[in-house]
Image (tube, rainbow, N blue to C red):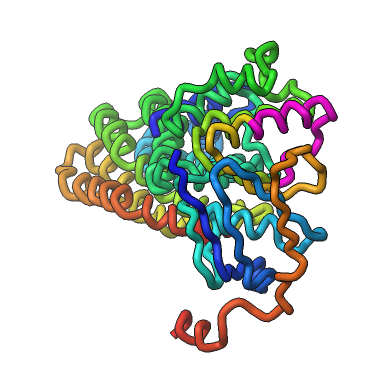
Amino acid sequence: MTAKDYRVSDLAVARGGLVVLEGVGFTLRPGHALVLRGPNGVGKTTLLRTLAGLQPPVAGDIGLPPEAIAYAAHADGLKATLSVAENLAFWAAIYGTDRVETALDRMNLRELRDRSAASLSAGQKRRLGLARLLVSGRPVWMLDEPTVSLDAASVALFADVVRGHLAEGGAALMATHIDLGLTEAGVLDLTPFKARGQAAGTASDFDEAFA
Amino acid sequence: MIALLLRDLRLAVRAGGGFGLGLAFFLLVAVLVPLGVGPEGGTLAKIAPGILWVGALLACLLSLDRIFALDFEDGSLDLLATAPIPLEGAVAMKSAAHWLVTGLPLTLAAPVLGVLLHLPGEGYFWLVASLALGTPALSVIGTFGAALTVGLKRGGLLLSLLVLPLYVPTLIFGAEVVKRGAAGMAVEVPLLLLAGITLGAAAVLPFASALALRINLR
């Protein structure tokens, strides 16, 4: 993992053709976590999706290569008919790593190893979804409400996993309302960057698109 | 990427995976047509190539919306798009998995169903050959349609409307191969055109599908 800072500057992102955030800038240092705050609908998910490369930014610089990012969305991307280990083994093959067993241990999924994902509880599914981050071996974790449906013990477990990741020189950017107890985490409130709702792109863009 | 192919195959054969849906439909068509048309061998033999190809095509169409819809719903399509494998490759693997789960079983089952439809003896080889050459095109074109309509609620109708016109050349040349083969005529021209469609679709459409997916995931 490189000890390089990831710098994002003057970023504007749009959701459904409407700019929701503009002028967003921050620096993410290896070994550090940054927590995104802001009311529902302010654009936390949109910002994370843009950074992960799922949608293009309206403006701004992203000094954060998509190849460095492991993105964990609201949905866990689990296949119900595959077992816990098979789900993880698939992602390990996709990311070209062999960290399935480590991930099972770290996320306390060892006993559930051969259960099918369909038979897991919501919290267990979430733990399996987050275990994918460990399997990916990527330095920057982007977490969208990672603690949804986790109980207090699991939240503490996950906080430990994130701490371990940071200690190894990784970084994490997370949108969450629950305090993970990461004392070293910075907080970025997105409310000041809220855009005043103009459409993304100008009329001339549309003319070009349909010329 | 092979991991993606293997995962899709594994999902297809496990409970609720939809393996056999197309095959069962194909079987029903081939069984019901003789009952509807009547048992007269001459008539059946004449329409057999067309019926078998139409049946195979509609059977393929049945399972198209599953190619991306399930991955979209459970979020794994987002995760695949951010994964290190190129999306074009992932799309190609999805097409391959779809063909292995629908096209290949249809091709293998077709000769058996040909018997039900009194297909003349010379036609069997060309029936298998034309399906083996033509059904990959159906899967690749269908994947493109599925990529265009992913994320639409109940986009099945739109998907069929988009894909059916693109299926027509495959159908025409595929059935023509069998028709000519059964009548003992030369089959080179429709066979080459069929192969051309398949190769062209396989070369171009994965890129178009990946582009459509990227836009739909925004």
Q: Residue shown at 50%/47% (left/top)?
A: B81
Q: Which residues are magenta?
A: A144-163
Coordinates of residue B65 in the picture (x, y in percent): 57, 46
Residue A104 sits in quarter: top right
Place of residue A177 in the rendered image (x, y in percent of width and height, measured from the top left):
81, 48
Could you tell me if residue B32 is visible in this image?
Answer: yes
User: Seen from this angle, which residue lies furthest front?
Assistant: A184
Q: Residue at x 60, y 70 (%)?
A: A12
Query: In the figure, is residue B130 to the left or right of B104?
Result: left
Residue A156 image position (x, y, % from top left): 77, 29
Task: Kindly tell me whether residue B217 is visible in this rendering.
Answer: no
| Quadrant in the picture for the N terminus of chain A | top left
- In this rendering, the answer to whether A5 lies above or below B53 is below
Image quadrant in which the C terminus of chain A is located: bottom left
As drawn, is B58 to the left or to the right of B172? right
Would you say the magenta stretch is mainly helix, strand or loop?
A: helix
Q: Residue at x 77, y 66 (%)?
A: A191
Q: Tell me what residue is drawn at x 81 percent, y 59 percent.
A: A40
Res. B177 image quadrant: top left
Q: Is residue B70 left or right of residue A206?
A: right
Counting every numbered tag in the picture gives 0
Residue A136 is inside the magenta segment: no
Looking at the picture, does residue A153 appear above or below residue A145? above
The residue nearer to you, when weighing A51 against B91, is: A51
Q: Nearer the viewer, residue B92 or B160?
A: B92
From what the image shows, is residue B105 above or below residue A186? above
- Locate residue B168, reporting x and y percent: 39, 55
- Farthest right residue? A152
Residue in the foreground of this view, choosing between A31 and B41: A31
